[in-house]
Image (cartoon, rainbow, N blue to C red):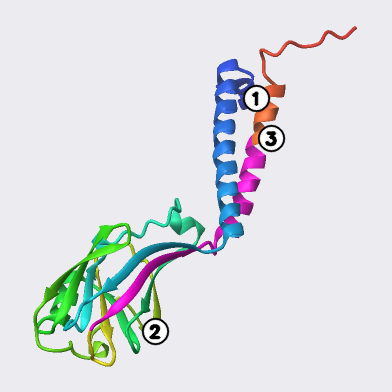
Amino acid sequence: MAAPGSLLRKPVVSRSLLIVAVLVGAFATTSAITGWVYLRNGPIVSDLGRVNGGEGSHSLLMEAAGVSVDVAVPLVDWWGEAEILAQSVSPGEIFYGEAAVDDARGYLAGSSYAAARPTGEGTWKIFPVPGQGAPPDPATREWSASGTGRSVRIPVSGTDGAMVLVRLDGESPVNVDMSVQFTASHARIYVLLFAMLAAGCFAAALLFVIRDPRRPKRNRS
Protein backbone atom coordinates (compact mmCIF):
# COMPACT_ATOMS: atom_id res chain seq x y z
CA MET A 1 0.00 0.00 0.00
CA ALA A 2 1.43 3.34 -1.04
CA ALA A 3 2.12 5.93 1.63
CA PRO A 4 0.08 9.18 1.55
CA GLY A 5 3.21 11.16 0.82
CA SER A 6 4.02 9.10 -2.26
CA LEU A 7 0.44 9.46 -3.54
CA LEU A 8 0.63 13.25 -3.27
CA ARG A 9 3.79 13.18 -5.37
CA LYS A 10 1.92 11.56 -8.27
CA PRO A 11 1.06 14.19 -10.92
CA VAL A 12 -2.53 13.02 -11.43
CA VAL A 13 -3.34 13.06 -7.72
CA SER A 14 -1.59 16.38 -7.15
CA ARG A 15 -3.34 18.08 -10.06
CA SER A 16 -6.73 16.68 -9.03
CA LEU A 17 -6.32 17.96 -5.48
CA LEU A 18 -5.22 21.33 -6.84
CA ILE A 19 -8.41 21.62 -8.94
CA VAL A 20 -10.60 20.61 -5.98
CA ALA A 21 -8.90 23.15 -3.70
CA VAL A 22 -9.35 25.94 -6.25
CA LEU A 23 -13.02 25.11 -6.89
CA VAL A 24 -13.89 24.87 -3.19
CA GLY A 25 -11.91 28.03 -2.50
CA ALA A 26 -13.79 29.88 -5.25
CA PHE A 27 -17.15 28.71 -3.83
CA ALA A 28 -16.15 29.75 -0.31
CA THR A 29 -14.94 33.14 -1.53
CA THR A 30 -18.18 33.77 -3.42
CA SER A 31 -20.23 32.75 -0.39
CA ALA A 32 -18.23 35.00 1.94
CA ILE A 33 -18.69 37.96 -0.42
CA THR A 34 -22.43 37.22 -0.68
CA GLY A 35 -22.81 37.22 3.10
CA TRP A 36 -20.80 40.43 3.40
CA VAL A 37 -23.09 42.11 0.84
CA TYR A 38 -26.16 41.07 2.85
CA LEU A 39 -24.60 42.50 6.02
CA ARG A 40 -23.85 45.78 4.25
CA ASN A 41 -27.26 46.21 2.61
CA GLY A 42 -29.46 45.34 5.59
CA PRO A 43 -32.93 43.74 5.28
CA ILE A 44 -34.06 42.77 1.79
CA VAL A 45 -37.74 43.40 1.06
CA SER A 46 -39.78 41.86 -1.75
CA ASP A 47 -43.12 43.62 -2.28
CA LEU A 48 -46.11 41.30 -2.83
CA GLY A 49 -48.56 44.14 -3.44
CA ARG A 50 -51.82 45.29 -1.87
CA VAL A 51 -54.67 42.81 -1.36
CA ASN A 52 -58.14 44.38 -1.34
CA GLY A 53 -60.79 42.00 -0.06
CA GLY A 54 -63.69 44.07 -1.36
CA GLU A 55 -66.87 45.22 0.32
CA GLY A 56 -68.75 42.50 2.16
CA SER A 57 -65.68 40.33 2.73
CA HIS A 58 -64.71 40.08 6.40
CA SER A 59 -61.52 38.07 5.88
CA LEU A 60 -58.94 36.99 3.32
CA LEU A 61 -57.76 33.50 2.39
CA MET A 62 -54.45 33.03 0.56
CA GLU A 63 -52.92 29.65 -0.17
CA ALA A 64 -49.20 29.75 0.56
CA ALA A 65 -48.41 27.60 -2.50
CA GLY A 66 -49.45 30.48 -4.76
CA VAL A 67 -47.55 33.20 -2.91
CA SER A 68 -44.01 33.82 -4.08
CA VAL A 69 -41.54 34.34 -1.25
CA ASP A 70 -38.54 34.77 -3.53
CA VAL A 71 -36.39 37.49 -1.97
CA ALA A 72 -33.48 36.93 -4.37
CA VAL A 73 -31.45 35.27 -1.62
CA PRO A 74 -29.81 31.89 -2.34
CA LEU A 75 -29.76 29.46 0.60
CA VAL A 76 -32.09 31.60 2.71
CA ASP A 77 -31.93 29.24 5.69
CA TRP A 78 -28.14 29.65 5.80
CA TRP A 79 -28.02 33.41 5.89
CA GLY A 80 -30.98 34.31 8.12
CA GLU A 81 -34.75 34.35 8.30
CA ALA A 82 -37.49 35.35 5.87
CA GLU A 83 -40.79 36.70 7.19
CA ILE A 84 -44.10 37.54 5.55
CA LEU A 85 -45.21 41.00 6.62
CA ALA A 86 -48.90 41.98 6.53
CA GLN A 87 -49.70 45.65 7.16
CA SER A 88 -53.33 46.62 7.61
CA VAL A 89 -54.67 49.34 5.33
CA SER A 90 -58.17 49.04 6.80
CA PRO A 91 -59.11 50.63 10.14
CA GLY A 92 -58.22 48.70 13.28
CA GLU A 93 -56.04 45.66 13.87
CA ILE A 94 -55.95 42.39 11.96
CA PHE A 95 -55.43 38.76 12.90
CA TYR A 96 -53.01 36.85 10.70
CA GLY A 97 -52.87 33.08 11.05
CA GLU A 98 -51.43 30.15 9.12
CA ALA A 99 -52.95 26.66 9.01
CA ALA A 100 -53.46 23.70 6.69
CA VAL A 101 -55.60 24.61 3.68
CA ASP A 102 -58.53 22.40 4.76
CA ASP A 103 -58.42 23.77 8.33
CA ALA A 104 -58.37 27.36 7.06
CA ARG A 105 -61.33 26.75 4.75
CA GLY A 106 -63.19 24.99 7.56
CA TYR A 107 -62.65 27.99 9.84
CA LEU A 108 -64.03 30.39 7.21
CA ALA A 109 -66.91 28.14 6.12
CA GLY A 110 -70.26 29.95 6.26
CA SER A 111 -68.73 33.41 6.58
CA SER A 112 -68.26 36.04 3.88
CA TYR A 113 -64.63 36.14 2.76
CA ALA A 114 -62.41 36.64 -0.28
CA ALA A 115 -59.94 34.16 -1.74
CA ALA A 116 -56.90 35.98 -3.12
CA ARG A 117 -54.47 34.62 -5.70
CA PRO A 118 -51.37 36.44 -6.97
CA THR A 119 -51.26 37.24 -10.68
CA GLY A 120 -47.67 38.50 -10.70
CA GLU A 121 -45.93 41.88 -10.37
CA GLY A 122 -47.61 42.69 -7.07
CA THR A 123 -51.22 42.27 -8.22
CA TRP A 124 -53.92 39.92 -6.95
CA LYS A 125 -57.06 38.29 -8.30
CA ILE A 126 -59.96 38.35 -5.83
CA PHE A 127 -62.66 35.65 -5.72
CA PRO A 128 -65.54 36.65 -3.37
CA VAL A 129 -67.01 33.76 -1.39
CA PRO A 130 -70.55 34.56 -0.21
CA GLY A 131 -71.59 33.88 3.37
CA GLN A 132 -73.02 35.37 6.54
CA GLY A 133 -70.88 37.96 8.31
CA ALA A 134 -67.53 37.46 9.98
CA PRO A 135 -65.91 34.14 10.93
CA PRO A 136 -65.67 32.98 14.59
CA ASP A 137 -63.11 34.45 16.97
CA PRO A 138 -59.74 33.19 15.64
CA ALA A 139 -58.63 32.59 19.23
CA THR A 140 -60.97 29.59 19.30
CA ARG A 141 -58.84 27.75 16.71
CA GLU A 142 -55.28 26.42 16.68
CA TRP A 143 -52.84 27.95 14.20
CA SER A 144 -49.37 26.87 13.15
CA ALA A 145 -48.34 30.55 13.40
CA SER A 146 -50.32 33.66 14.21
CA GLY A 147 -50.18 37.30 15.26
CA THR A 148 -52.35 40.38 15.74
CA GLY A 149 -51.82 44.10 15.25
CA ARG A 150 -51.66 46.78 12.60
CA SER A 151 -48.51 45.10 11.31
CA VAL A 152 -47.96 41.35 11.69
CA ARG A 153 -44.85 39.31 10.88
CA ILE A 154 -44.95 35.55 10.38
CA PRO A 155 -41.82 33.46 9.61
CA VAL A 156 -41.87 31.84 6.18
CA SER A 157 -42.55 28.17 6.90
CA GLY A 158 -42.00 26.78 3.40
CA THR A 159 -45.11 24.61 3.69
CA ASP A 160 -48.14 24.53 1.39
CA GLY A 161 -50.63 25.79 3.97
CA ALA A 162 -52.93 28.80 3.87
CA MET A 163 -52.87 32.31 5.27
CA VAL A 164 -55.98 33.80 6.86
CA LEU A 165 -56.38 37.52 7.61
CA VAL A 166 -59.35 38.78 9.65
CA ARG A 167 -60.30 42.23 10.90
CA LEU A 168 -60.60 41.99 14.68
CA ASP A 169 -63.48 44.51 14.74
CA GLY A 170 -65.56 42.14 12.58
CA GLU A 171 -66.05 44.76 9.87
CA SER A 172 -65.28 44.65 6.15
CA PRO A 173 -63.39 44.97 3.91
CA VAL A 174 -59.93 43.60 4.79
CA ASN A 175 -57.20 45.47 2.90
CA VAL A 176 -53.54 44.69 3.53
CA ASP A 177 -50.12 45.38 2.04
CA MET A 178 -48.12 42.15 1.77
CA SER A 179 -44.37 41.78 1.52
CA VAL A 180 -41.54 39.39 2.34
CA GLN A 181 -38.59 40.64 4.39
CA PHE A 182 -35.27 38.81 4.69
CA THR A 183 -32.85 39.57 7.52
CA ALA A 184 -29.31 38.17 7.31
CA SER A 185 -28.94 37.47 11.01
CA HIS A 186 -26.63 34.46 10.46
CA ALA A 187 -24.48 36.08 7.79
CA ARG A 188 -21.70 37.23 10.15
CA ILE A 189 -20.97 33.66 11.26
CA TYR A 190 -20.99 32.26 7.73
CA VAL A 191 -18.81 35.05 6.36
CA LEU A 192 -16.15 34.15 8.93
CA LEU A 193 -16.43 30.40 8.28
CA PHE A 194 -16.36 30.76 4.49
CA ALA A 195 -13.45 33.21 4.66
CA MET A 196 -11.46 30.71 6.74
CA LEU A 197 -12.37 27.90 4.32
CA ALA A 198 -11.32 30.00 1.32
CA ALA A 199 -8.00 30.89 2.94
CA GLY A 200 -7.33 27.22 3.75
CA CYS A 201 -8.19 26.06 0.23
CA PHE A 202 -6.03 28.63 -1.51
CA ALA A 203 -3.15 27.89 0.89
CA ALA A 204 -3.49 24.21 0.01
CA ALA A 205 -3.62 25.06 -3.71
CA LEU A 206 -0.42 27.08 -3.38
CA LEU A 207 1.25 24.15 -1.62
CA PHE A 208 0.25 21.79 -4.44
CA VAL A 209 1.69 24.22 -6.99
CA ILE A 210 4.98 24.48 -5.10
CA ARG A 211 5.22 20.71 -4.70
CA ASP A 212 4.11 19.91 -8.27
CA PRO A 213 6.23 16.92 -9.43
CA ARG A 214 6.32 18.34 -12.96
CA ARG A 215 7.74 21.64 -11.79
CA PRO A 216 11.39 21.93 -12.92
CA LYS A 217 13.84 21.82 -10.03
CA ARG A 218 16.77 24.22 -9.76
CA ASN A 219 20.21 22.72 -10.03
CA ARG A 220 22.39 23.41 -7.06
CA SER A 221 25.95 24.33 -8.02
Task: Please name the residue that numbered disc 2 is placed on.
Answer: 150
Which of 211 and 78 lies nearest the eye of the viewer?
78
Q: Is residue 38 left or right of residue 139?
A: right
- The residue type indicated by label 2 comes to Arg
Residue 220 coordinates in the image, percent (x, y): 87, 9
The boundaries of the magenta stretch are: 173-201
Q: Quadrant of the N terminus?
A: top right
Q: Decide which of tag 1 and tag 3 comes sooner along the chain.
A: 1
- The residue type indicated by label 3 comes to Ala
Check disc 3 and report its element: helix, strand or loop.
helix
Q: Image height check: is 103 above or below 199?
A: below
Q: Residue at x 77, y 11 (%)?
A: 217
- The residue type indicated by label 1 comes to Gly
Point out the frontmost of discs 2 and 3: 2
Q: Is residue 68 magenta?
A: no
Q: CA distance from mark 2 to mark 3?
A: 53 Å
Quarter of image, res 129: bottom left
The reply to whether dot 2 and dot 1 touch (C-beta < 8 Å) is no
Task: Please name the residue that numbered disc 3 is placed on.
Answer: 203
Residue 211 coordinates in the image, percent (x, y): 70, 21
Task: Please name the residue that numbered disc 1 is placed on.
Answer: 5
